[in-house]
Amino acid sequence: MIYPSIDKLLNIVDSKYKLVHIVSKRSKQMHEYDHYQMKECDYVNKRELGRALEEVEKGLVKVKNN
């Protein structure tokens, strides 16, 4: 099961497509630069994609609504 749930994330981001774009971009940054915004022990997920979802949920990744 994916944590956090898609329902919680869609309250933050208004579109599934925008969410996919934001999370994929952030996970690539994590992989490339090895930079995380939380301590590694604070993440529930082990992979960058799940960790990027967690950062969106906690408000660490700012989402611009155009």
Image (cartoon, helix red, strand yellow):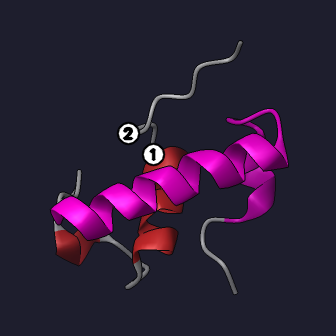
Q: Secondary structure at mark 1?
A: loop
Residue beneath label 2, please?
Answer: 60
Q: Is residue 4 left or right of residue 13?
A: left
Mark 1 = which residue?
58
Q: Quadrant of residue 66?
A: top right
**Which quadrant of the figure has residue 1?**
bottom right
Circle count = 2
**Which residue is rendered at x = 68% and y = 17% of the image?**
65
Q: CA distance from mark 1 to mark 2?
A: 6 Å
Indicate left or right for 22 with 13 as reference: left
User: In the rendered view, would you say 14 is above or below 34?
Assistant: above
Amino acid at circle 1: Lys
Left/right of residue 57 with respect to residue 33 in the rendered view: right
- Residue at horizontal 59%, vertical 20%? 64
At a point 25% along the width and 65% down the height, the residue shown is 32
Element assignment for label 2: loop
Tell me residue 3's x, y (percent). 60, 73
Q: Position of residue 57 (x, y in %)?
A: 54, 48
- Residue 18 counted in the magenta span: yes
Place of residue 60 in the rendered image (x, y in percent of width and height, measured from the top left) = 38, 39
Q: Amino acid at mark 2?
A: Leu
Expressed as whole percent of the image width and height from the top left, the position of residue 62 reads 47, 29
32 is higher (above) or lower (below) than 2: above
Tell me which secondary structure the magenta stretch mostly adopts. Answer: helix
Q: Residue pushed farthest front?
A: 32
Q: Please check the rendered image and state whether residue 9 is part of the magenta-colored stretch, yes or no.
A: yes
Image position of 58 (left or right of 20): left
The reply to whether dot 1 and dot 2 touch (C-beta < 8 Å) is yes
Q: Nearer the viewer, residue 29 or 43?
A: 29
Q: Nearer the viewer, mark 1 or mark 2?
A: 2
Residue stretch rendered in magenta on the structure: 5-34
Does 39 appear above or below 40?
above
